[in-house]
Amino acid sequence: MPHKEEDYTEFTPNLYPPFPDDVPTVKLNTITLSKLLDGDAVEKIRVFEACVGRGFFYLDLGGCEAGETILQGADQIALTGERVFKLPLAKKMQYKMGKTLFGYKFAGSTVTDKAGTPDTAEFFNVSKNDMIVPEDRMCRAWPSEVLDAKPLFDAYVKSAHGVGMTILTILAERLGVDPSEITNRHRIEELSGDHVRITRGPPRHMEEMPEIQTPSHTDFGTVTILMNWLGGLQVWSESSRTAQVGNLHPDLPGEWLWVKPKKGCAIVNLGDAAVTFSSGILCSGRHRVIPSPGAQGQWPRYSIVYFVRPEDKCPMRQLRGKGIPDGPEEEGEALTATEWIYKQSAALGNRFDN
């Protein structure tokens, strides 16, 4: 059912002030999606270099159908998210997260430091698998606000997942691995932890160092595709491939640097699964989210993320290829992706009894 535009009072990106120029920012390469889809050899090399370096890059989405679907779809999904977050808390809690990590997470359900300080962001995770099948085949209940937008989620998921597969194919080729070895661990039709996350972070309450919305972490999955309109994302200045599960602090000296939102671009980063599959060649960058800097902090911060994660039954073992160093022989049964991601999430401070 259509919704009146005047109903929306928070997500108004045309009104947001510019990102301030007096805060320390990270320099990220900008990769052009249309060039990757056209097989541009130089652009492929640039992707690989970004992924073995910091593990973050901008992805220019203009000039191709998949990119335009993500650009336009992200705005519409954010508006859908506003409708969801406006629901009474009791209603939202009917869709609370469980061990699948799908559904609603209320603000304060995770901790941001060793002192147990609660986070300040709420989010709603919409399962990939439920959005690409008929309603009678969905695995869980969803609020009507999500179901009304199901065609939107379907198109967005398929485009974002396709972008993820393009990136993974390029990385596999550079690592000397048959691309099917990694894409077959991420088939869109198979059950997995892939989802669209709609996040709302509240405006800043204080001018000094603001409260943390999402604690310091590395992502659990393989590829993350972020759309945001306000600042808030920060990356640690030193990249590392030794992120420790449950460690809420960086493991190398450095400083937090802002990632400036870039119009027309997604922010792409790799997750811990990519590090595992490549035996540490690829990098999962440490990051966190805090309220936006400067005047932007007066606005609620919405973001849309698509997480590409391994299939639920995928064993979390490294790939074998000429560009991947041989790791130690892995004895016994490996954790499945479901077990592995649940373990990672619990270590980050997510509580599943919320």
Image (spheres, rainbow, N blue to C red):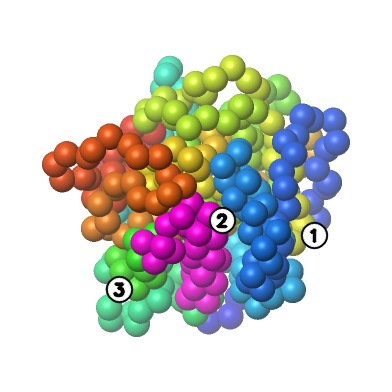
Task: Kindly identify the amino acid type of the residue bearing the numbered disc 2.
Answer: Ile
Q: CA distance from mark 1 to mark 2?
A: 22 Å
Image check: 4 left or right of 240?
A: right
Residue that lies at the very extreme toward the left in this rendered image:
332
Q: Position of residue 174 (x, y in %)?
A: 53, 54
Q: Is residue 214 magenta?
A: no
Residue that lies at the very extreme toward the front in this rendered image:
322
Circle 1 residues within 10 Å: few <14, some 14–19, many ≥20? few
Q: Residue at x 34, y 82 (%)?
A: 134
Mark 3 lies on residue: 138
Q: Position of residue 217 (x, y in %)?
A: 48, 34
Of tags 3 and 1, which is closer to the observer? 3
Of tags 3 and 2, which is closer to the observer? 2
Q: Earlier in the sequence, mark 3 or mark 1?
A: 1
Taking depth in this image into account, of 89 and 235 the one nearest to the observer is 235
Task: Kindly identify the amino acid type of the residue bearing the numbered disc 3.
Answer: Met
Q: CA distance from mark 3 to mark 2?
A: 24 Å
Q: Earlier in the sequence, mark 3 or mark 2?
A: 3
In which quadrant of the rendered image does the C terminus lie? top left
Image: 57 above or below 36: above
Disc assigned to residue 14 = 1
Q: Position of residue 68 (x, y in %)?
A: 68, 73
Q: Residue at x 15, y 45 (%)?
A: 333
Query: Residue 133: which quarter of the image?
Result: bottom left
Image: 352 above or below 225: above
